[in-house]
Amino acid sequence: MMKAIKLTLVPVMLCFFAMGFVDMVGIASNYVKADLGINDATANMFPSLVFFWFLLFSVPTGMLMNKIGKKRTVLLSLLVTIVSLVLPLFGESFGLMLVTFSLLGIGNTLMQTSLNPLVSVVIKGNLAATLTFGQFVKAIASFLAPYIAMWGAMGALPSFGYGWRVLFPIYMIIGMAAAAFLSVTSIPEDEETGKASSLADSVKLLGKPIVLLSFIGIMCHVGVDVGTNTTAPKILMERLGWTLNDAAFATSLYFIFRTVGCLTGSFFLRVMKARTFFVISVSMMALSMVGMFVGTNQTLLYAAIALVGYGNSNVFSIVFSQALLSVPESKNEVSGLMIMGLFGGTVFPLLMGFASDAVGQVGAVAVMAVGVAYLFTYVNKVKQ
């Protein structure tokens, strides 16, 4: 039995890797900004556009899962993602990149909404720890993206004339492999499959305090995540006078510590109270905001980026699992609502773009700090 579960988890975890493709938008927006000569507010449209689709498609995806099942919904998400990764092979115009990141956002919305509940079908216990391990796998794709883009831009690997855009065909091939493996894996659906639900039924769940507060918590988590992903290189460029290729490592540093945080978090959440670990995580994020706000040297800024990477790595899993377990009879609908909270990835970068254009990157950090402050208020909602 355990061997069968482990074999089933392999393609599921490969899908988590494909889920990490969306995080390429941070470094990609910086390269598009440099290529097209646009300002911060315009460049930040790309990550904002990616996460805008979470607002529109998350709840309908929860309803779709009730009709076609979780596995088929994940396969559909992979198909949309693969199409989004094909488009940049034909150019890098502003319009083409807008379509690319729109499709990437739609595919990721479908995936995040359906893949997490699919894990709850495969694994009945230690859901938060398993989701955290999935986030660890996702983070591997996230921190590799800046390196691949940087190596492609510098000619350090064969890019076939695509430069930094070689990132897209590489991830496209991995996405195709994930779809192939999952399609041949047998995963029995639970009793919720086929149950009718409506948009009103899903939205009504926000009337439950734990669901609403968790929704806001995920908005803040992803706002800080996408915000750091996008802003960290800009802080180094502004404070230290670095070039984009030099500063691109900041994004990888963030995801390296997110990866370490997810890997160690999957252990800590088995041996430590979830609330205690949540407090430690958010405290690290708060220290990071201070460091990014006042830091003027490489060591302090790197330490701040590492702190927010580790601290933010387990917030999603803890908040998501609290919401999912609070209404077990409506897992699909709750999952849709929680993933809709990733709309914070639209709100935060837009506000940060305007703030940084007005007062510099310190303004962007101040916007993220508001999200961290909210997460402190969520502590009492985390069950022991």
Image (spheres, rainbow, N blue to C red):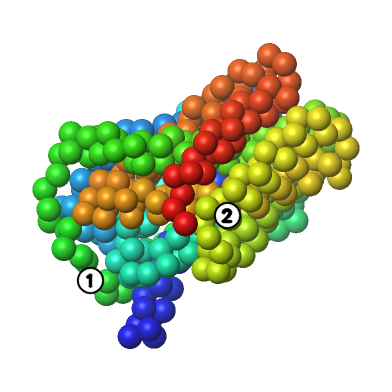
Picture coordinates of residue 84, whole percent (x, y)? 43, 45
Picture coordinates of residue 381, whole percent (x, y)? 44, 44
Q: Is residue 79 visible?
A: no
Q: Is residue 336 left or right of residue 312?
A: left
Local crowd at mark 2 within 10 Å, few (<14), some, or many (≥20)? some
Image height of 26 relative to 151, above or below? above
Name which residue lies at 41% across and 63% down. Answer: 127
Image height of 253 relative to 290, above or below? below
Picture coordinates of residue 2, whole percent (x, y)? 38, 84
Quadrant in the rendering for residue 289? top right
Residue, disc 2: 276
Q: Which tag, 2 or 1, sits closer to the chain's start?
A: 1
Nearest the camera: 147 or 37?
147
User: Residue 339 shows which numbered tag?
Assistant: none
Name which residue lies at 59% across and 28% down. Answer: 370
> Three-letter amino acid code at disc 1?
Pro
Nearest the camera: 27 or 310?
310
Q: Secondary structure at mark 1?
A: loop
Name the residue at the top extreme.
Answer: 358
Image height of 38 relative to 330, above or below? above
User: Residue 188 shows which numbered tag?
Assistant: 1
Q: Nearer the viewer, mark 2 or mark 1?
A: 2
Picture coordinates of residue 126, whole percent (x, y)? 42, 67
